[in-house]
Image (cartoon, rainbow, N blue to C red):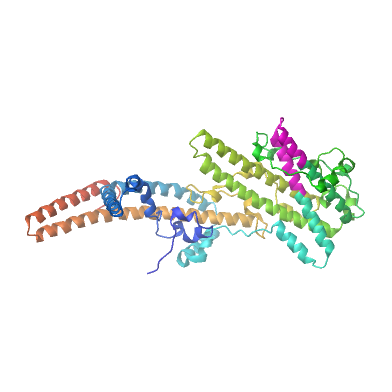
Amino acid sequence: MDIIPAVGKFHLSAHKQSCFPRFSLMFIPGAGHVDGEILETLWASFNKISPSARAMSLAHRQEVYDDYMRDSNWKKLVGLAKSLRKKYKTALAGVKSTKEPFEELTRSLDAAKIQEWSQQAVKADFERGETLDIYSLKIEKAPTLAEIRLSLVQSAPGSERTQSSVNWLIEGISIENAQDALRAEIRCLGNSPSTVQETAIAMRRQRLMGRVIKFNQMARDFTTNVILNGSSLEILEDDPLFCTQEDQEVMEDDIPRTGPPSDEDEEFRNKLEDELGYAYPESMRLHMPSSLPSEDKSQSDKLSKSLQQEEIQLRVGQVNDCLSSLKNHLGQKAVLYRINFRSSTSNRTDTRSKQDIRKVVLKINSDVRSYHRAIGALKALGASEDLLEKYRIIQPEDLAVSKDITEENRFNQSSHILPWFWRIGSDDSTSSVWDDEFLRVSWLKARARYQRWREELDLIKCEMLWTTLWFKHRQKEWQDREEKSEEPGQQAYAAKQQQIWIRFAETAEKTFHEYIAIQ
């Protein structure tokens, strides 16, 4: 006998992601729709007697629990026919709700692909183990900014200039993120900030200005013969579509506290007017290769090609980091909205849930703005068309969270395709391959759900028949005991038990007759 391991639905969500396809009851043929839990289903009813059992002795508590469990089992036996009828109606509704989306999705796909995926599913059902990973998206992790930085430094271990230029470009990207954070913080303050808030912003501007001046001074060492001056640089502006939730009142606890200015800040404070005039540091574009105007061809040709390629690779890492962070924050937003906000039972809980969601929305907007800055830099650097086609512009409607990520066990799954950035991470940048990948997983899961509901309906029909036959079998057992017994008391008790089981059998036949034929 082969034992197929599985994890109950109550505990599966606490396991790592790779456990879902390999140990989910949804992907075990013949399992039907069962939760796989035993003790957990009794907790709710056991809680009713827990207050009175706390003060009991060990022996008394054990007797009370035994009596309560016997009573629970007897009630289940008495209501077994009604319970099976209710399960039958639920299974019938499940079959109807999963059959139509599955058949509709099947008709819309190529027959050759359906045959290939069906063979994969049959093989996974038979072999189990790693073959069940076909129910998961095959997305490889894209290289991060830190990994690309490491590869650039390792590619030229003896070149101090390469290491310095990489560190300089990384610092520029970090300053851009700091500028964006400060602009968002200022937008959150509104029109009447407090003195404490204004002081905090002023100190952060001083620190940021020092970093900007030092960075632009270092730019002269890497952009020889290139004229980079403040008048040729554009003032940074954020897309208003991704500045939502920032015009509301902010708690003072949300303003990052900064310590007193350091000696380094004092050193650069006197250079502010000479270097950048009266412009605020959070609004100035840095002197990076991507900062050159695209129409200034003569200046672009003077830049080192290796420096441009280094920034291109680092910007790709920045894009991948932004998309990874964006997906995580979108998932957090969906969980907060579904678990906290929808289930809130008071105005206080509702308000705190909205504040939590707003904080996540601010992070999502920051991720998108950082992503768009990186895309703009790639275009200015003349990145390849294939690269720019892979990384598209994010629209507000792309930020909706798909239930394929947040609610994998749902009904009515059709041919929905996730927004494009959920598919970023593979070496293959063609959209058709990724469309096939998502359609494959959607079809396989829709097939599994439909099959499990169909199995559940068949199992319940069998349980109806088995239950009725078992009632009749128990009645026959007590009839034999009555015939073999010689004591009048035993005969009377056996006759009473016969009548109980006869009534159980009659109730079952009356309840099940419209669903199955019992002979």
Whether residue 8 is visible here, answered yes or no, is yes
Whether residue 519 is visible here, answered yes or no, is no
What is the chief secondary structure element of the magenta stretch?
A: helix
- Residue sitting nearer the eye, 32 or 121: 32
The furthest residue to the top: 192
Percent position of residue 2, x then y: 40, 68
- Residue sitting nearer the eye, 253 or 69: 253
Percent position of residue 483, x then y: 10, 59
The furthest residue to the bottom: 1
Instruction: Decide whether residue 195 is among the magenta residues.
Output: yes
Judge from the rendering whether residue 411 lies leftward or rightward of residue 235; answer left or right: left
Percent position of residue 358, x then y: 61, 39
Q: In this view, does 263 lie above or below 135?
A: above
- Magenta-tinted stretch: 175-203
Looking at the figure, which quarter contains the N terminus?
A: bottom left
Percent position of residue 204, x then y: 76, 42
Residue 399 found in image quarter: top right
Instruction: Decide whether residue 492 is among the magenta residues.
Output: no
